[in-house]
Structure formats: C-alpha cells, structure tokens
C-alpha cells in the first residue's frame, strides 16, 4: 500500500511530462486571405496548433515565417506589410508542419474615366460618366468610390455618381478624383432638340362618318309603286262596267 502511494506522484509526473511534450498534428493560419489597399498597410496573422482530434492546443515552439514575393508583401513575426500591387503567399512553418495565407495587394495608382472622353449632348439631355480606381497593373480596385466635379456648373448639373444634365449651350470639363489621382473628360452641350410637329393631312375623297347616313331622309322610289289591294278594286270596277254595257 505504501508502495502504491509512492508510485502515484511519479505516474502523475510522467503524464504531465508526456502532455507537455505532445506535438501538434497540424497548424492553421487566420485569416486565410488578406487584402491590402495602401502602401505600407499591415495585417497580423495568427497561428493555431491543432492536436489529433482537431482541437486547439498549446505549443511553444518558434515559427518560421516566409513570403514568396517580397516585392509585393513582406512578413515578420506574423505581421504582413504591403509593398506593391500583386499577390503573395505567406507561409508559416513549425517543424514539419506548414500553413499559408494568400495576400492580395492593390495600391491605388490612378483614376480612369470609362468610355468616351469627348461627349456631346443637347440642352435637357442626360449622360452618365463612370470611373474606376486602378492599381499599378491597371486592375480595378473594388469598393473605392471617386468624387466628381465640373468646372462650369452653369453649363451642366453634375450628380454625385457622375450623372450630368445639360443646362445651357457651352463646353465643360468633368473630373473624377480619388485622393491625389484624377482623370477628366470634355462635354459639349448643344441646342435643345426640336420636336417634329407635322400637320395632320386632310383626308382625300369621301369619308363616311358613323351615324351620318341615318340623318338622311329616305329618298322616294322612282317609277310605279304598287299599293296593296289597289289592283283588285280597279278590276271590280271594270267588271261592273262591262256588265252594264251588255245590258
């Protein structure tokens, strides 16, 4: 019994040592994707150690960090820094285990007005300008809105989203801006469009109007008109006259 009491602390100590020496089965990086839109912008990656059952565990071992494109993004102790537009893969390594995160860097490099930069409309007409912010490779950067301005408000009205309305004849310059970047287009407003007003042509020939014929009086029939019973009376008179003459 005394021997058993002596062995219990030893067994507990062995279990603790074994637990402390347990190695993770896998590692995970969060987030798995990162997007940076400014030069020198940063994002911090977190690493998780997972045991055989997929549960997070503690593991105090050094992590080696690396990037496959230092010209796009660098990494130090899990902190990623944007350098230039492009895509890079950040990798964390612990022993034989690795995990990675994809980093997309899109640094604004210009503003581009889409479509024609020489537009002509008439007074009263509308036109929609559109523009986008692009990176150094010419790729549009989603989620970045441009600001609009016009140099001659007396010629066109300009809405927040690039919609213009011709007010008066003349020429104006519309500009889209994002921070220090800008692009411009010219718009010419001409005379208002004239509506085509054609006089209704008079109808040729006779036109029959509904109900018009009903107002006309019925014409009397020409020639002999037979009256019912008239011929019989005339015949009776003739027969009587013939009989009288014979007498």
Image: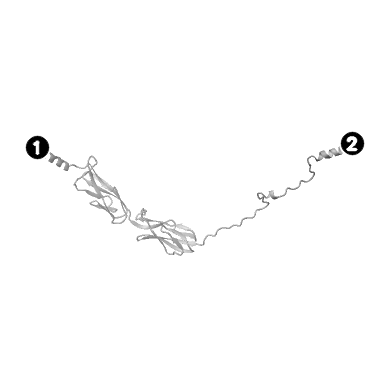
- Kindly indicate the quadrant of the structure image that contains residue 71: bottom left
64 and 35: which one is in front?
Answer: 35
Q: Where 95 sits versus 36, above or below?
A: above
Residue 5: mark:
1
* Mark 1 residue element: helix
29 and 4: which one is in front?
Answer: 4
Q: Which residue is drawn at 87% across and 37% down?
A: 240
Lower position in the chain sequence, tag 1 or tag 2: 1
- Residue 6 x %, y %: 8, 38
- Residue 38 x %, y %: 31, 56
Identify the coloring: one colour
Label 2: how many Cα within 10 Å (few below 14, some 14–19, many 20+)? few
Q: Quadrant of the N terminus?
A: top left
Which residue is the extreme one toward the right? 247
Q: Quadrant of the C terminus?
A: top right
223 and 152: which one is in front?
Answer: 223
Residue 215: mark:
none
- Residue 144 x %, y %: 36, 55
Q: How far apart are marks 1 and 2 (CA)?
A: 173 Å
* Mark 2 residue element: helix
Q: Label 2, on which residue?
A: 243
Q: Where 142 sits versus 157, above or below?
A: above
Q: Where 205 sits versus 244, above or below?
A: below
**Tag 1 and tag 2, C-beta contact below 8 Å:** no
- Residue 233 x %, y %: 82, 39
Q: Is 94 on the left-hand or right-hand side of 172?
A: left
Q: Is 167 on the left-hand or right-hand side of 47?
A: right
């Amino acid at each position: 019994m005394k021997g058993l009491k002596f062995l219990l602390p030893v067994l507990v100590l062995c279990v603790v040592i074994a637990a402390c020496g347990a190695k993770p089965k896998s590692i995970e990086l969060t987030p798995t994707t990162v997007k940076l839109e400014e030069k020198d912008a940063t994002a911090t990656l977190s690493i998780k150690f997972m045991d055989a059952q997929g549960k997070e565990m503690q593991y105090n071992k050094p992590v080696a960090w690396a990037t496959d494109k230092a010209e796009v993004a660098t990494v130090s102790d899990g902190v990623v820094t944007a350098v230039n537009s492009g895509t890079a893969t950040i990798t964390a390594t612990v022993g034989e285990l690795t995990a990675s995160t994809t980093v997309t860097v899109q640094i604004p490099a210009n503003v581009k007005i889409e479509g024609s930069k020489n537009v002509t409309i008439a007074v009263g007409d509308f036109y929609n300008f559109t523009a986008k912010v692009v990176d150094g490779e010419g790729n549009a950067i989603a989620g970045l809105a441009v600001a609009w301005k016009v140099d001659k408000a007396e010629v066109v009205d300009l809405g927040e989203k690039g919609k213009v309305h011709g007010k008066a004849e003349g020429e104006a310059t519309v500009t889209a801006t994002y921070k220090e970047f800008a692009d411009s287009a010219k718009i010419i407003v001409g005379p208002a469009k004239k509506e085509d007003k054609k006089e209704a042509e008079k109808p040729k020939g006779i036109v029959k109007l509904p109900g018009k014929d009903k107002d006309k009086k019925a014409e009397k029939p020409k020639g002999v008109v037979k009256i019912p019973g008239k011929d019989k009376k005339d015949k009776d008179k003739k027969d009587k006259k013939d009989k009288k003459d014979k007498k």
